[in-house]
Image (cartoon, rainbow, N blue to C red):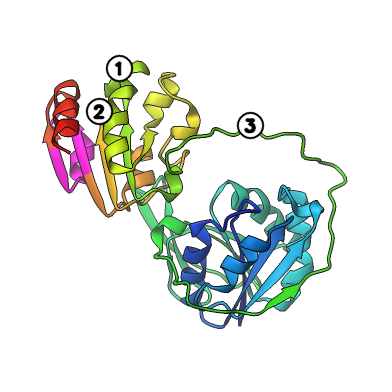
């Protein structure tokens, strides 16, 4: 068996999801080959070679892959897939964009959002917004798998794998990169943060989210939000944590004014320690919280910030 793992990166830095993908791939067994597709991505390749368990790093460094358009990447992987029994990618925006195309072109069923690997052909994934867990066995000749990276620990970085250049160039004919509008913040990314503090509908308005800033600064935390807060227009949707937002699993997750709807719990329940602050002692969030504080967030947040 051999597994092709697609590296998650931005042409400058290798994202931590890649180390977690490799850890998941190890549970299948066989050789693990990492594919780095991008442009001027030498630093990413160097980081990929250090991941424990990686046998080789394939490098497709060409301007055609600079923005990792799904049409280009899917065609590239199709060319390479002949040599592999499995293709793994993170269940991120990037992976969800090109992996279904790969599965369709190979005429196999994609196995999505895997949280556990049972064997080479059997995987565990959540369904119904995490309310049920399905064990899926596939008989397809190629296993096309997207992985919920937050469910796996990261592989170490004590390796020194060889690299191999890939000369295949797949340029999209029907699509082109136009522009990107990126939200810049000095805070860590939600999906990579060790500490996250999130606000919900209980924050009452967008201005009150400023109450989270001082605590986030002291903890080095990212700031998130529930879908209810996003839908109400309190904060932009790139802050949303949940089934239809970002799936996170930090060391510490602080939920403030969040009732704990199923959709939100599905996105953060794998956090190592969960702290909930809510004035409703019957709120569902307390069922998953390790520590719960029943109280008015407008009184409790200043106290928390002062005591940190």
Q: Position of residue 202 (x, y in %)?
A: 26, 23
Depth order, front residue of 123/188: 188
Quadrant containing the C terminus is: top left
Q: Earlier in the sequence, mark 3 or mark 2?
A: 3
Q: Find the residue positioned furthest to the right.
A: 173
Q: Is residue 278 magenta?
A: yes
SS at mark 1? loop
Which residue is at 44% across, 33% downward?
239
Seen in the image, is 196 located left or right of residue 1? Answer: left
Q: Earlier in the sequence, mark 1 or mark 3?
A: 3
Give the Cα separation between the discs numbered 2 and 1: 9 Å
Rendered image: mark on residue 181: 3
Q: Which residue is mark 1?
A: 204
Depth order, front residue of 73/9: 9
Give the Cα separation between the discs numbered 1 and 3: 28 Å
Asked which quadrant contains residue 62, the reply is: bottom right
Q: Which residue is mark 2?
A: 257
State whether residue 117 is above or below residue 127.
Answer: below
Asked which quadrant contains residue 81, the reply is: bottom right
Which residue is at 34% across, 46% downward?
268
């Amino acid at each position: 068996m051999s597994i092709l793992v697609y590296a998650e990166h931005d042409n400058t830095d290798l994202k931590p999801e890649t180390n977690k993908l490799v850890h998941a791939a190890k549970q299948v067994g066989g050789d693990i080959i990492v594919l780095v597709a991008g442009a001027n991505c030498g630093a990413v390749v160097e980081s990929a070679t250090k991941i424990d368990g990686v046998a080789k790093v394939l490098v497709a460094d060409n301007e055609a892959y600079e923005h990792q358009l799904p049409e280009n990447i899917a065609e590239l992987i199709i060319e390479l897939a002949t040599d592999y029994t499995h293709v793994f990618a993170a269940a991120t925006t990037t992976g969800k964009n090109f992996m279904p195309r790969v599965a369709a072109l190979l005429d196999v069923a994609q196995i999505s959002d895997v949280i556990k690997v049972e064997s080479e052909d059997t995987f565990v994934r959540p369904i119904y917004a995490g309310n049920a867990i399905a064990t899926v066995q596939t008989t397809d000749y190629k296993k096309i798998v997207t992985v919920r990276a937050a469910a796996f620990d990261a592989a170490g970085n004590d390796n020194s794998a060889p690299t191999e250049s890939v000369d295949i160039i797949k340029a999209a004919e029907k699509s082109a990169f136009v522009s990107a509008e990126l939200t810049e913040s000095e805070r860590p990314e939600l999906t990579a943060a060790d500490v996250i503090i999130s606000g919900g509908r209980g924050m009452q308005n967008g201005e009150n989210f400023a109450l989270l800033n001082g605590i986030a600064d002291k903890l080095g935390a990212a700031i998130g939000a529930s879908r209810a807060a996003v839908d109400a227009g309190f904060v932009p949707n790139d802050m949303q944590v949940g089934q239809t937002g970002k799936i996170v699993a930090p060391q510490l997750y602080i939920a403030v004014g969040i009732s704990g709807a199923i959709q939100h719990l599905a996105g953060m329940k794998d956090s190592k320690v969960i702290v909930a602050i809510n004035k409703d002692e019957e709120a569902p969030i307390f069922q998953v919280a390790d520590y719960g504080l029943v109280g008015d967030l407008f009184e409790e947040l200043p106290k928390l910030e002062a005591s940190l």
